[in-house]
Amino acid sequence: MGCEQWREVLSAQLDGEESPEERAGADRHLAGCGDCREWFDRAASVTRRARLSVSAPGPDLTGVILDALPTRARRSRRARLLLTLRATLGLVGAIQVVLGLAQVGRAAAGPHLHAGGPLASGHLWHEAAAWNVAVGAGFLFVAARRTPPTGLLPMLSAFVATLVLLSVNDLVTGRVDTTRLVSHAFLLLGYAIVVAMSRPGLRPGGPTPRGVEDEPRWRIHVEDEVPAPGLRLLPPPHPGTARHRDRTAA
Amino acid sequence: MTDDAQITAWALAAGRGDRDAASRFIRATQQQVRRFLAVLISPAEADDLTQETFLRAVRALPSFAGRSSARTWLLTIARRTAVDHVRAGTSRPRTVPMSDRYDSPDLARDGFDRQVVLERLIAGLPAERREAFVATQVLGLSYAEAAEVCGCPVGTIRSRVARAREDLVAAVDSRDRRAERRGGSTAG
Ligand SMILES: [Zn+2]
């Protein structure tokens, strides 16, 4: 073993990271090598000074860093809200479709099941069912996509407004039973969610909750991403700055 | 210094959204992070880089699993921030540590400036040796912890620290010899 290898052992010894055998071997080498004795002394003195080096403490950054947090919390709240809205809308859409299909089934079973008067019979009944299925499919579409649902709004608004006016009228004149009106509640709920999702602040395709400039290069789990259990932020195995001078030395 | 277990506990609580724990975590670790970055990059850029490190860390806290100590986890992020900073080329070009100003024998005899000289010599080490040396000597991490922070085997840390010591001993030697020569010429 040459002086170079012994110096690695001596260096480890200065850090208390040597094995007992290494220490004994290094002691024997030092006894017979003046160069390494001198190097060991110098290395010890450089080490002492390096450990002493104190930089003036910097400013307390706690406030600055925590101030950056609330916006992030707000953004993640928004992301959660959006997710809830989309899930609810998906459910409402599914119910709407099921109600529409059930309406078709009931029409096939016989028009007299419903107390809706003239509407309850024949083709008009089918047409109403088709509308329910279509609106449900629209809700499902909006829930599944991440794009703003603004395109659906005009038609939905007209449909809902007309339906509300006619329902009120039918209710007053006693031409509709309340169970039928209850099913409209799903439609109203879905409509409300679509309106909410069209607002710029909540638009799925709107301002992204993530910074672009300050995004670190490795993957960090944020917001709606589910963190993998036990993930550790270790740097990639081959750091980009690697100069391989040490590898040959090692 | 607050112990590792306490800091890790704060980090875990902060990851669950506890703001108070987050502020304790930051307060307990920021000076060490700053010191690491000051020696690794430069004192002038240390504040900015410390802030950047903590912003990254705070964002990543929810995924911190506590399998390693929060301190080494945080220093890993600090190192990554430093690496990215250098790679992005935003770092000021590092001046060769042997500037003439510090060659003056009067300054070199002064304890404070000897310290400045040593810090400049450390700053002049090749990047990998520098981070291994700073992590183990200036921050006092064990070789195992430093290996975790630098993402390399323990044996590599050991050899890098030894090479860094050799570089520093050689640099201090040559400086001392030059200072002696200059001192001798003024005297005679
Ligand atoms: Zn020797």
Image (cartoon, rainbow, N blue to C red):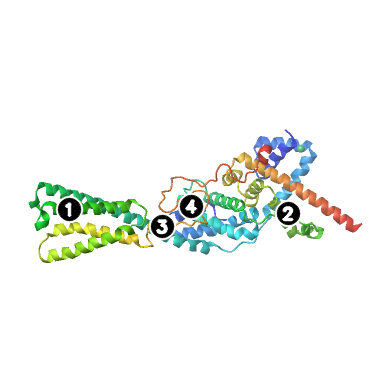
Q: Residue at x 62, y 52 (%)?
A: B86
Chain letter of mark 3 equals A
Quadrant for the N terminus of chain A in the image: top right
> Is the residue under label 4 in contact with that under label 3 (CB below 8 Å)?
no
First along the sequence among labels 1 and 3: 3
Number of the label disc, if any, that sits on residue A76: 3
Q: What element carries label 2?
A: loop
Some atom of ligand 1 lies within 8 Å of the CB belonging to the residue at label 3: no
Q: Name the residue under label 4.
A: B60
**How far is the residue under mark 4 from the one under mark 1?**
53 Å
**How far is the residue under mark 1 from the one under mark 2?**
85 Å
Number of the label disc, if any, that sits on residue A127: 1
Q: How crowded is mark 4: few (under 14 residues within 10 Å), some or many (20 or more)?
A: many
Is residue B181 rendered to the left or right of residue A172? right
Query: In terms of image quadrants, where is residue A169?
Result: bottom left
Quadrant for the C terminus of chain A in the image: top right
Q: Which amino acid does label 4 sit on?
A: Ala
Q: Do pointers 2 and 4 mark residues of a single chain?
A: yes
Q: What residue type is labelled 1?
A: Glu
**How far is the residue under mark 2 from the one under mark 3?**
47 Å
Please tell me in which quarter of the rendered image ligand 1 is found: top right
Please identify, in this view, whether the residue under mark 3 or under mark 4 is nearer the observer. Answer: 3
> Is the residue under label 1 in contact with that under label 4 (CB below 8 Å)?
no
First along the sequence among labels 2 and 4: 4
Number of the label disc, if any, that sits on residue B97: 2
Q: Which amino acid does label 2 sit on?
A: Pro
Chain letter of mark 1 equals A
Image coordinates of residue B83 in percent, x first then y, are 60, 50
